[in-house]
Image (cartoon, helix red, strand yellow):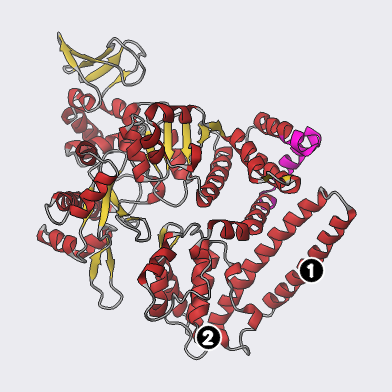
């Protein structure tokens, strides 16, 4: 890794005059030879922050921070030295040689520059369409219904994607952009039939997604009716990876608050900003990521999360908390407090603010629970029945699992003390179980999987999730299926998670065609089934696949594409993910090789499921209240052991 040349740094400091750099963040007034303003690094009522244009430096006489334009950007944008130089180089037109050891080179940087320019033009196009007297009517009506005034619409750059399949493509072609650049932007898809590209977004309210510096890097589109998915994002591209960004962070960071509020949707974030909570951001995928947590830590000391109150939102909360706590336990350099807030009456923040006002919502934020307190409350509430009382067995599993995630020993001990009161056990026994799980990542993950599997059926019934329960009497596969029934099917999709092995298993099942029905090659018990998959989307696709499977021809990709278009997998369009995997599976021309891959993934998934169930049963047996219950568990464990041995024998035969 090379150093940035001194002459480049000198040129940046010459062009990036301190007055214009600081002026982007601080309101300055001239007094004598210097400029003065309120310090952006600490709270003050009387200006003590001084900018000296002749020396090209700044100094705060309150907190004593000072330096040149590069130092200022490092402080304001939480960047390291090379990042700040590149930031200023882009801003003031100074080319900074790439010394980071990547392979982009000049051509790569030019590609990125062109894509960013294309995305800016795209935002202008959507904005014009929104304000068009005829084309933008549906979008303006929706905006009016959601009480979005012109100031808000303009502030967030909200636009509209027309219903035409190629209106944006034609507009960008006139601006001189190539089809490849359009594809690189993540806003276009390529037709499988004729190879032509077409607009990814049609008939949606469009939200530009900015990076933390204010550059447009992607878009999110909100359906104006009951279409599914309700929200659709640009695919990952040269300039965008949803895991590394947060919606509205470019605005939120200007608040210089020690706290960031994280909500799930664009509309919630916008509503929060309008209500005065301008330190709010929104996640851009199906689940919060460790990269996003690290990004938060650059700008604040505390994060308050709002998760949807429905079943999917609460599942997402547990997954996100697990990820964050385990991530923080591995990184001693990141110090950040995590709180979980709950909106009363199961409302989302936008609904609650409109109904009750900003002051009431401020109470909700203040009442947010520290993550360990939330987990204690969650373990109790999830396992309490007004008639039967607390299910101690399930409560024990949950609270010990949750406690094992908490890296702070004192907080874990406090959780154990509270849990012991409910369980009628000693705090030491509960803490020992938490510590045992904390020391074994495998046991922890197995218990988590067992927990999800055991409750999957309950959640399916409770949520009436159509994506996870395609009923045989619903002729969704009929040639003339009623469109409204298809749309309602899509509206309820909840859990779209899928492991890499699950995706590959499904792809090889598709690729095998009629071989899947040949019992000489694949035993009937080795045909994939919905229960082999963990997420609702994949369960639904397997049910659809089996319902249209033809023993002589299998199922064509074209036939399944209709089902793929209804769901997402891991936050991305299912057709995008499965098209890639099915294409890879088709490369294996030898049917036996293809079959062995299929069976290998199937057996691996089933072994994992069995281990998870075994771990949960073993844990439950330790605290069983009667010999009868222990005998029943032993019988189940014996059956699982036999089943596991049978699978392993099959694996050896591959």
Tag shown at residue 220:
none
The local crowd at label 1, few if under 14, some if 14 to 19, many if 20 or more residues have their Cα within 10 Å, is few
- What is the secondary structure assignment of the residue under circle 1? helix
475 on left or right of 206: right
Instruction: Identify the residue at horizontal 48%, vertical 74% (top origin).
Output: 474
- What is the secondary structure assignment of the residue under circle 2? helix
543 on left or right of 372: left
In primary-sequence order, the first of circles 2 and 1 is 2
Question: What are the residue bounds of the magenta stretch?
Answer: 419-443
- Looking at the rendered image, the quarter that the C terminus falls into is bottom right
**Up/down of 366 relative to 506, above or below:** above
**Up/down of 128 relative to 148, above or below:** below
Q: Position of residue 493 (x, y in %)?
A: 46, 60
Instruction: Identify the residue at horizontal 66%, vertical 40% (top origin).
Output: 380
The local crowd at label 2, few if under 14, some if 14 to 19, many if 20 or more residues have their Cα within 10 Å, is some
Q: Position of residue 522 (x, y in %)?
A: 61, 84
**Up/down of 213 relative to 588, above or below:** above
Q: Which residue is mark 2?
A: 591
Question: Where on the picture, by quarter, is residue 356?
Answer: top left
Distance from disc 2 to disc 1, alpha carbons, whole Å, reads: 33 Å
The kind of secondary structure the magenta stretch mainly shows is helix
Viewer-side residue, 550 vs 409: 550
Q: Which residue is mark 1?
A: 639
Inspect the magenta stretch and tell me whether residue 432 lies in it: yes
Residue 27 in view? yes
Inspect the magenta stretch and tell me whether residue 441 lies in it: yes
548 on left or right of 73: right
Instruction: Identify the residue at horizontal 77%, vertical 51% (top origin).
Output: 619
């Amino acid at each position: 890794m090379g150093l940035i040349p001194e002459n480049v740094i000198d040129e940046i400091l010459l062009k990036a005059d301190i007055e214009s750099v600081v002026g982007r963040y601080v309101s300055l007034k001239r007094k004598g030879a210097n400029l003065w303003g309120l310090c952006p690094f600490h709270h003050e009522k009387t200006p003590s922050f001084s900018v000296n244009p002749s020396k090209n430096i700044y100094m705060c006489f309150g907190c004593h921070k000072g330096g040149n334009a590069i130092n200022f950007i490092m402080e304001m944008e939480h960047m390291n030295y090379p990042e700040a130089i590149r930031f200023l180089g882009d801003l003031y037109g100074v080319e900074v040689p790439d010394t980071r050891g990547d392979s982009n080179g000049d051509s790569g940087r030019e590609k990125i520059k062109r894509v960013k320019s294309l995305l800016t033009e795209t935002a202008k196009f959507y904005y014009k369409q929104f304000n068009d007297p005829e084309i933008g009517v549906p979008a303006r009506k929706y905006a009016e219904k959601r009480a979005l005034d012109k100031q808000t619409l303009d502030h967030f750059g909200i636009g509209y994607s027309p219903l035409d399949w190629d209106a944006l493509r034609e507009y960008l072609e006139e601006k001189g952009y190539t089809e490849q650049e359009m594809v690189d932007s993540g806003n276009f898809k390529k037709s499988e039939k004729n190879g032509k590209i077409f607009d990814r977004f049609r008939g949606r309210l469009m939200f530009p997604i900015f990076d933390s510096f204010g550059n447009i890097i992607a878009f999110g589109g909100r359906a104006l009716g009951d279409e599914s998915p309700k929200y659709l994002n640009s695919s990952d591209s040269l300039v965008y990876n949803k895991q590394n960004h947060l919606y509205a962070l470019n605005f939120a960071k200007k608040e210089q608050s020690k706290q960031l509020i994280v909500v799930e949707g664009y509309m919630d974030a916008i509503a929060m900003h309008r209500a005065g909570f301008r330190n709010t951001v929104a996640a851009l995928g199906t689940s919060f990521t460790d990269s996003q947590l690290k990004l938060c830590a650059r700008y604040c000391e505390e994060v308050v999360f709002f998760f949807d109150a429905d079943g999917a939102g609460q599942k997402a909360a547990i997954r996100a908390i697990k990820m964050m706590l385990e991530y923080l336990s591995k990184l001693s350099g990141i110090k950040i407090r995590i709180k979980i807030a709950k909106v009363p009456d199961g409302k989302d923040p936008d609904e609650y603010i409109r109904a009750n006002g900003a002051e009431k919502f401020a109470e909700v934020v203040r009442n947010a629970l520290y993550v360990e307190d939330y987990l204690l409350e969650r373990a109790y509430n999830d396992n309490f029945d007004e008639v039967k009382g607390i299910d101690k067995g399930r409560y024990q599993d949950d609270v010990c699992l949750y406690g094992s995630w908490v890296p702070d020993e004192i907080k874990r001990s406090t959780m154990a003390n509270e849990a012991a009161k409910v369980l009628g056990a000693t705090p030491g026994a509960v803490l020992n179980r938490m510590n045992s799980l904390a020391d074994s990542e495998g046991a922890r993950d197995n218990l988590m999987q067992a927990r999800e599997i055991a409750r999957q059926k309950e959640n399916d019934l409770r949520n009436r999730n159509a994506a996870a329960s395609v009923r045989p009497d619903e002729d969704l596969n009929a040639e003339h299926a009623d469109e409204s029934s298809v749309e309602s099917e899509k509206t309820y999709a909840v859990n779209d998670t899928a492991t890499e092995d699950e995706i590959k298993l499904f792809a090889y099942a598709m690729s095998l065609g009629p071989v899947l029905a040949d019992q000489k090659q694949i035993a009937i018990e080795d045909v994939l089934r919905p229960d082999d998959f963990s997420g609702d989307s994949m369960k639904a696709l397997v049910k659809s696949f089996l319902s249209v499977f033809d023993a002589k021809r299998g199922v064509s990709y074209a036939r399944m594409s209709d089902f793929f278009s209804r769901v997402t997998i891991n936050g991305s369009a299912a057709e995008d993910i499965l098209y890639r995997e099915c294409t890879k599976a088709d490369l294996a021309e030898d049917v036996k090789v293809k079959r062995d891959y299929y069976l290998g993934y199937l057996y691996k998934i089933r072994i994992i499921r069995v281990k998870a169930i075994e771990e949960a049963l073993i844990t439950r047996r330790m605290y069983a209240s009667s010999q009868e219950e222990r005998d029943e568990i032993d019988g189940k464990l014996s059956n699982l052991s036999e089943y596991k041995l049978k699978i392993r024998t099959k694996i050896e035969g591959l």
